[in-house]
């Protein structure tokens, strides 16, 4: 690379289809001194597919606090390091924020590559308004859940929510209770993969659909914001 100083690269990886990686991402992964991976087994499969054999080290939510200082020290000594998550863009409900902040505070250059991001794919594919939106990640499971839902019920922007297949029906039911049966939404599952599914309709229709169906895979729920008409009512 043109620069001899250390640098942190945030490199998006495919969310399903292995063809969804940029030429630039492949080049960076081949040239860095070290790749930090959320799950080294998952990343090694991708690297093998791409014929990349760079050193790889574990970096995940359970060790990020303990390893940030060591990684920043390596960056300051001139190492070029790439951070990847299991799928999609690092820091989006995945580890990455702490390291990015620490690197910037240490005056280490950070470069984020564009690439796959499941909330954006789900939003654009949902057919719901995409000019303004809010990403909520996973809703609280217990403490603070009802408070969060009451606040979101008044949100005017399209909302993007992560959910597991085991809690999908419960979350759809909770959304229906707080947002109303007729609020439009879309459940996107297994995006970019062989069995990709996007089910659109009212929250009532989605609850009915998924109550009698067993689903697998990662899920993004897109929910329409509260309209001015519904606020007036």
Image (cartoon, grey):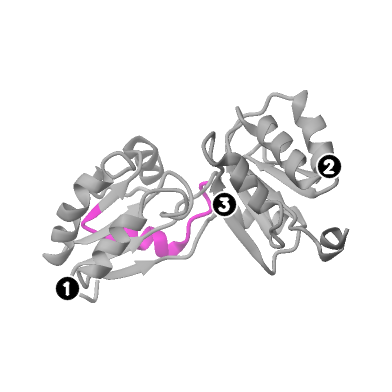
Label 3 packing within 10 angstroms: few (<14), some (14-19), many (20+)? some
What residue lies at 54% left-to-right and 34% top-to-bottom?
Answer: 142
The mark nearer the N terminus, 1 or 2, is: 1
Does 134 sit left or right of 233 as displayed? left
Q: Which residue is mark 1?
A: 4
What residue lies at 44% left-to-right and 63% top-to-bottom?
Answer: 23
Q: Position of residue 77 (x, y in %)?
A: 11, 65
Element assignment for label 1: loop
Count up the numbered dots: 3
The mark nearer the N terminus, 2 or 3, is: 3
The mark nearer the N terminus, 1 or 3, is: 1
**Front in this rendered view, residue 87 or 22:** 87
Is residue 103 highlighted in magenta?
A: no
Q: Which mark is residue 136?
A: 3
Say whether marks 1 and 3 touch (CB < 8 Å).
no
Closer to the camera: disc 1 or disc 3?
3
Q: Which residue is mark 2?
A: 181
Q: Position of residue 79 (x, y in %)?
A: 17, 62
**Front in this rendered view, residue 158 or 73:** 158
Element assignment for label 2: loop
Q: Quadrant of residue 27?
A: bottom left
In the figure, 98 relative to 187: above or below? Answer: below
Does 78 sit left or right of 132 as displayed? left
What's drawn in magenta, residue-wise? 18-34
Say whether marks 1 and 2 touch (CB < 8 Å).
no
Estimate the spatial distance between the alpha carbons at disc 2 and disc 3, rounded to whole Å: 21 Å
In the figure, 98 relative to 6: above or below? Answer: above
Farthest residue in the left direction? 77
* Camera sees residue 78: no
Label 1 packing within 10 angstroms: few (<14), some (14-19), many (20+)? few
Does 116 sit left or right of 70 as displayed? right
Quarter of the image with the N terminus in it:
bottom left
């Amino acid at each position: 690379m043109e620069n001899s100083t250390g640098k942190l690269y945030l490199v998006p990886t495919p969310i399903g289809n292995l063809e969804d990686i940029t030429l630039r991402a492949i080049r960076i992964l081949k040239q860095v001194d070290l790749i930090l991976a959320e799950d080294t087994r998952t990343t090694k499969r991708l690297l093998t597919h791409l014929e990349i054999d760079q050193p790889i080290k574990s970096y995940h939510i359970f060790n990020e606090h303990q390893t940030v200082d060591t990684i920043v020290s390596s960056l300051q000594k001139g190492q070029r390091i790439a951070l990847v998550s299991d799928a999609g863009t690092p820091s989006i409900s995945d580890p990455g924020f702490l390291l990015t902040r620490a690197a910037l505070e240490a005056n280490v250059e950070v470069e984020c590559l564009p690439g796959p991001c499941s909330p954006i794919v789900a939003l654009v594919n949902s057919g719901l308004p995409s000019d303004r939106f809010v990403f909520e990640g996973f809703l609280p499971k217990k403490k603070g859940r009802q408070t969060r839902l009451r606040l979101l019920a008044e949100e005017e922007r399209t909302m993007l929510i992560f959910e597991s297949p085991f809690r999908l029906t419960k979350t759809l039911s909770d959304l229906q209770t707080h947002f109303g049966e007729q609020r439009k939404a879309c459940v996107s599952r297994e995006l970019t993969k062989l069995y990709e599914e996007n089910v659109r309709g009212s929250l009532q229709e989605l609850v009915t659909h998924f109550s009698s169906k067993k689903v697998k895979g990662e899920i993004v729920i897109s929910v329409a914001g509260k309209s001015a008409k519904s606020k007036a009512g």
